[in-house]
Image (cartoon, rainbow, N blue to C red):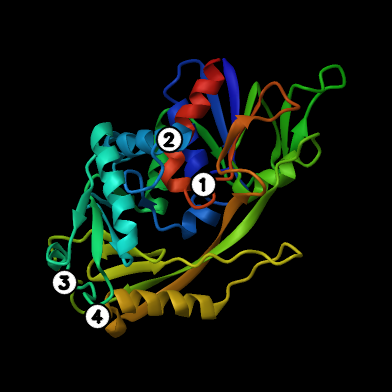
Amino acid sequence: MTHVVVVGCGVVGAAIAYELSQIPDLSITVLDRQPPAQAATGAALGVLMGAISQKVKGNAWRMRQFSIQRYETLIPELEAIAQQPIPYNRQGILMLCFDVEALPRWQQLAETRQTQGWQLEIWDREELRRCPQINPEKVLAAIYSPQDRQVDPTALTLALVKAAQTKGVTFHFDAQVLGLKSTADDSQTCQQVQTTAGNFSADWVVIAAGLGSTLLTQAGIQPVDIRPVLGQALQLQLENPLGDRNFQPVITGDDIHLVPLGNEQYWVGATVEFPNNAGEVSADSAQLDVVLEGAIALCPALAQAKILKTWSGLRPRPYGRPAPIIEPLPEYTNVLLATGHYRNGVLLAPATAQAVCDLLAK
């Protein structure tokens, strides 16, 4: 039996644990200092921008494509195993276009996607009437991606945990990881993961701890530098749904997402707030006001909405290199990194889990 320890139980760690649980002869333990779906996962909006992203080749596109395809089977699979619903919007994503000069780029993307087996639609102002909530004075056109999705990140993560538990995965949510322990004769192999709840033996360790990954690698030759980027969002309540009750896609424009939740409620977000020179970042209410004002400019009916709550979270962004980081930790033979997903943790969780399975199989 091979013992695998996964550090971190956000959506990425939970997805890794679940997919690893399908592999025979693995004993899997997941460690976290807090309950699942906290930190970046708990603050995410779960917008899955795959086909509508500008990534058209290479690993960045392959991961998005795999994840979008996997979600179509993963959601019903988890709902059947965990016996709990996962809010999953299958009505696509509508990207608003404000600049006529950008339209040729979107047309080219639509043609590329067609050759890849994906569908994108370019809507003119006449077709935009399908979403009467959008301010026609602000928008020239839109790009509709019917195959992209949105999922509730917390519900998804909790279902992944429950499904993994049914397959024998053990979770410890009171275990703050303190370090990786090797022996004097074999400093390149991690023998144990040291935590406040005791030590856990490991044949393999997967670090999926987001911002916490930096601390776990600081003792090494090449520490991973992951820095926080804060995001704020709101939940709004309206008396009536925006537009057609039967057609409620995610609407995005000017980097503002409007996410329908049902019951006339919507998420709106998110800010992108970088740390100062000291590495500190705190929520700036003025930036959240700008996001809300921008959303109202796109959909004027939001001016009548009641704010039910606001929240913020820290996204883990690798410094000086692309996100995410999925690779072996250089000074170890049996430690893998699956971290630093920045704004795409929910989107790329399935592809990350598959990549970890592939690395362990080598």
Q: For numbered disc 4, what is the local secondary structure? A: helix
**Which tag, 2 or 3, sits closer to the chain's start?**
2
Please give the residue where the numbered disc 4 appears in the rendered image.
Answer: 301
Number of marks: 4
In the image, taking residue 315 as reference, residue 218 lies left or right, namely right
Residue at point 42% right, 67% down?
269
Q: What amino acid is labelled 4 in the image? A: Ala
**Which tag, 2 or 4, sits closer to the chain's start?**
2
- Report x, y in % for residue 75: 30, 40
CA gap, disc 4 to disc 3? Answer: 10 Å
| Quarter residue 323 falls in | top right
Compared with 26, 199 (above or below) is below
| Quarter residue 194 falls in | top right
- Report x, y in % for residue 335: 66, 28
| Quarter residue 327 falls in | top right
In the image, taking residue 130 as reference, residue 136 lies left or right, namely right
Please give the residue where the numbered disc 2 appears in the rendered image.
Answer: 63
Compared with 51, 66 (above or below) is above
Q: For numbered disc 3, what is the local secondary structure? A: loop
- Report x, y in % for residue 236: 33, 74
In the image, taking residue 284 as reference, residue 198 lies left or right, namely right
**Which tag, 2 or 1, sits closer to the chain's start?**
1
Q: Nearer the viewer, mark 2 or mark 1?
A: 2
Q: For numbered disc 1, what is the local secondary structure? A: loop
Could you tell me if residue 252 is visible in this image? yes
Please give the residue where the numbered disc 1 appears in the rendered image.
Answer: 10
CA gap, disc 2 to disc 1? Answer: 18 Å
**Which tag, 4 or 3, sits closer to the chain's start?**
3
Residue at point 74% right, 21% down?
189
Please give the residue where the numbered disc 3 appears in the rendered image.
Answer: 132
